[in-house]
Image: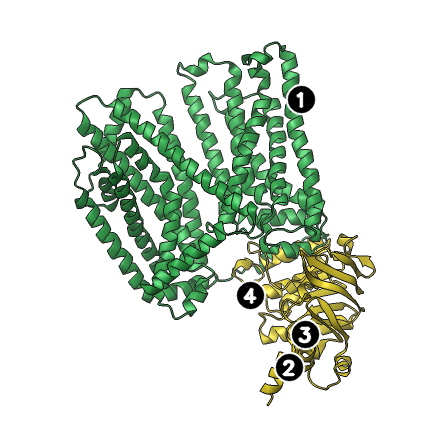
Chain colours: A yellow, B green
Amino acid sequence: MIEARGLTKEFGKFKAVDNVNFKVESGELFAFLGPNGAGKTTTIKMLAGLLIPSSGEALLSGISVHDNPVEAKKLIGFVPDEPNIYDKLTLREFLDFVADIYRMDRERAREIAEYYLEIFELTDRQDELMQGYSHGMRQKANIIAAMIHDPQVIFLDEPTVGLDPRSARLIKDILKKLTKEGKTVFMSTHILEIAEEMADRVGIIQKGQLKFVGTVEELAMAQGSKGSLEELFLQLTGSEEDKELISHLKG
Amino acid sequence: MQEYMLLMRTSAKIWFTSTFKSKSWKKILTTTFGYLALIGFAVFWAYTSSKLFGDLINLFPEGSEIILQSTVLSISSLLALSTIIFLFLTGLRILYEYLFESPDMSFLLATPLKVQNVFAAKLTECLGLIFISISYMTLMPFIGLGVAFKANFIYYLTTIISFLAGFALFGSVAALILLLIMRYVPGQRLKQILLSATLLFGILIVFISQAASSSMIGLTQEEIIAALNGLSDLGINKLSFLPHVWMAKASIATLPGSKINLWANLLPLLLIAGTLFWFTTKLSAKLYLSGWSSGQESDAPKKKKAKVEQQVSKGSGSPFSAMLKKEMLQIKREPMMWYQIAIGLIVMGFYAFNMSRSSGSQGVSDLAPDFIGKSVSLFMILLFAGLSGPTIAGLALSREGKNWRFLQALPLDSRTVYWSKFVFGYLPCLIEGLIGIAIFTFLPGTEMFPLYISVPVIIISLAALTALDLWTDIYFPNFNIKIGSSKSQEGTGKLLLVQLGMMPIIFLIGATFAFQWWYSNVAMFQGLSESVARVISLGLFSLETIGVFLICTGTAIKRLKLLFSGAVDAKGA
C-alpha cells in the first residue's frame, strides 16, 4: 500500500532523509520512530505528497505520489503535527469544506462527521468558530477531517500530542478498528508505549537513515537483548554516553 | 527598574536582529526600502506642511501677528487632539494585542519577573510602535511649522518631548481602561468591539476630511481667514487644563516671537504623564494577571445545531465551490478585509459629490475637453477598486497561513485553487468598480463614458490587476503573515510594497486607454489621425490587460503546482 523507494531529501548540504526504503501493507499499523530532527516529519511529508524528494520515489497503492499527486492524495488522510485549522470557520463548515474537496455525497459526509463528532464529544460545539478551540479540540478537528472521506491510507504525525487521556485512548481504538477494516495507518510518535502497544511493525530512523524496520520482537532479536521498546530504541539510537548514563541511572 | 531595563534591552535586541541582521539579502533590501519609503513620506509631509504654513503666514497682513499666533495655536491644538484620538482608537487595538495577545506573555508571566515590570516593558514597547506609526502623520506638520517659522533646535526638541509625554499620558490612560475592561468583557468580544471601532473611526475620518475639502472648494482668501478665525472661536486652544493643549502650547512656546509660557505647559504635562504611567503600572500588579487570563478564554458556544442540520443539501459539492465558499466565509468574518473597500467607496462617492457640486460653477472643467473629466472619473474608479486588490488577491494564498500544509495534503488541482483564489480576489474589486461606475453614471453633474465603454474597461482592467496581485502572492507567499493583526509587520510591508507597485501599473493602464484623447497634445503623436490613435489606444490597452492576465495566470498556475508538491520553498510553510 505504502512504498518508499530510495527516498532522499536534501536541504542544501544537509541530508534530512537518506535513501529510505520500506513497504507498509494494507491493514497494517506502522509506527515510525526516531529522535527529534531524525527525519520523521520530512519522510511523512514526502509520502503524503507535501514535499518533493531530492531522489527516490513514494508510491501509494502503486500510484506515484509525485507523478500523480491528486490521484494519490485522494487515497490518504493526513493529520499534521501542528493542529492548524481555519480559525474563521466553524467545525461544521470546515468538515463540509473537506467533504466537498473529496466530492463526497453530502449526506454520507454528514453521517461520518456525526459519528466522529459524537465520539470526540464535539457535537455541541461544531457551530462555533474554531478560533476559540483548545489545542486538543483542534487536534480532534484535524483527525475528523482526515477521516471524513474514509481514506485507504492514514498518515498521522504525532497524533496524540495535546489530547486528554480519554481522547488518546479513542484515537488508539479508532486506528485499531481501521486497520481491521483493511486500512493502512502510518503514524509517527515519540510515545514509545503507544507504538509498542499498537504497532504491527515499527520503523526507526536516525539522522535521516532508516536503522530498523520490523516487529518489536525482531528488534529485540536484532539487538540481542530483551526489554521494552523504549530500552531497545535507546540502545539503537543512543550514543555510547547515553548508554552509559542509562545503565548508571539503573544502578 | 533593573527588570524593566532588561526587558526593554531584550526587546530592542530582538527588533534589531530581526530587522537588520537577516541572512537574506531580499529581506534586508525589503526592510531598507520600507524604511526609506516611510522616511520619504515623512519628509514629503513635513515639506508640504511647511509650504502650507508658509502660505498661511502670507495670508495674514503685517501687524496681525497675534491673530496669526492664535490661529497657529488652534491648528496645533487640533493636530495634538487628532494624535490623541488616533492613539485612542487605532492604537487601542494595538495596545490590546501587545498587552493581552503577545505570544511571549505566558512565558514572561511564568518567570520570577514582577508583573508590573513585564506590563511596563510591554506598554513602553507598544507605545513606541504607536508613536512611530501615528506621529509621522501628526508630528510632521509640527516640523513643517518649525521650518515655516524658522524655529531653532529647542523648538524641535520640545515638540518631540511634549509628543512623547502626550503618548505616555494618554497611552497610560488607554492601558488603564483596558485593564479595567478586561475584568468584565471577554477577550474575543472586546477584540471585535475594538476592530469595529477602528473601522468606523477610519471611515469617519475620511468622511469628515472629504466633507471639509468639499466645502473648501471655491473659498476666497477672506473666507479662508474667516474660517480659521472660526476655528479659533471653537475654543480648542482655550481649554488650557487639557493635556492636548499643553502638548500644542509647549511646542508653540518655543517658536520665535511666541508669548506662551513653556514651563507652565511642559511641566504639568511631564508630571501628569509620569504619574499616570507609574500609577497604571502599579495597578497592573493587581489587575493585569486576572485580565490577561480572561483574555485567553474563548466565547461561549453558539447553539444553532438544529437549524443548521436542516440545511444539509443532497448531492456533492465541487472542490472549486468548496474553496470559494471557504474564502468568502473568511472574508465575511474579517472586518479588516472590508476596510480598504469601504474607504475606496467613500472616497469615490465624495469625489463624485465634489464633481457634481462644482459642475454648476464656472471653472477650469468647463474649458477642458469633455474626455478629461470622464477619463479622470474612470481612472479614479480603477485606482480605488484596483488598490483594494493587494489587500485581498495580494494576500489570497498567504492568508492560508499555517493551514497551507493541510491544504497541500488535499487532492486539489492547482488550477482549482488558482481560480478560486482569483474569483475571491476579483469579486470584491469588481463590485467596488461597478458601484463606482453606477455612482459616476447616475449622479447628476458627474461625467462618465457610456456604460458600453466603462463597464468592459473596468471588467478587463480589474481582471488583469487581480491576476497580477495574485501572481505576486503566489510567487512570494508568506505563510507567517497573520491577517487582521496590526502586529504582523511582514503583512503590512508586503501589502505596502504591492500597493506601491500597483500604482504605476494602474496609471499606465489608464493612460493607455486615454491615449486616443491626449495623443494630439504630444508633439511626436500629432501626425496621427483620430482613428489611428483610437486603434493604437485600444490595441495597446487590450495587449496590456489581456497580456498581463494571460501571462500572470499561466505562470501562477505552474508555480502553484510546484508549491503544492513542495518543490519550491515558501516562507512560513
* Labelled disc at residue A202: none
The three-letter code of the residue at mark 2 reads Lys
Say whether marks 2 and 3 touch (CB < 8 Å): no
Residue ID at (72%, 48%): B413
Q: CA distance from mark 4 to mark 1?
A: 56 Å
The three-letter code of the residue at mark 4 reads His
The three-letter code of the residue at mark 3 reads Lys
Same chain shared by disc 2 and disc 3: yes
Camera-side mark, 1 or 3:
1
The three-letter code of the residue at mark 1 reads Gly
Marked residue chain, label 4: A
Same chain shared by disc 4 and disc 2: yes
Label 1: which secondary element: helix
In percent of width and height, residue A29 lies at 75, 72
The vertical placement of B144 against B362, above or below, is below
Marked residue chain, label 2: A
Tally of marks: 4
Which residue is label 3 attached to?
Answer: A172
Marked residue chain, label 3: A
**Residue that sits furthest to the right in the current view:** A62
Which residue is label 2 attached to?
Answer: A243
Which residue is label 1 attached to?
Answer: B539
In percent of width and height, residue B264 lies at 17, 45
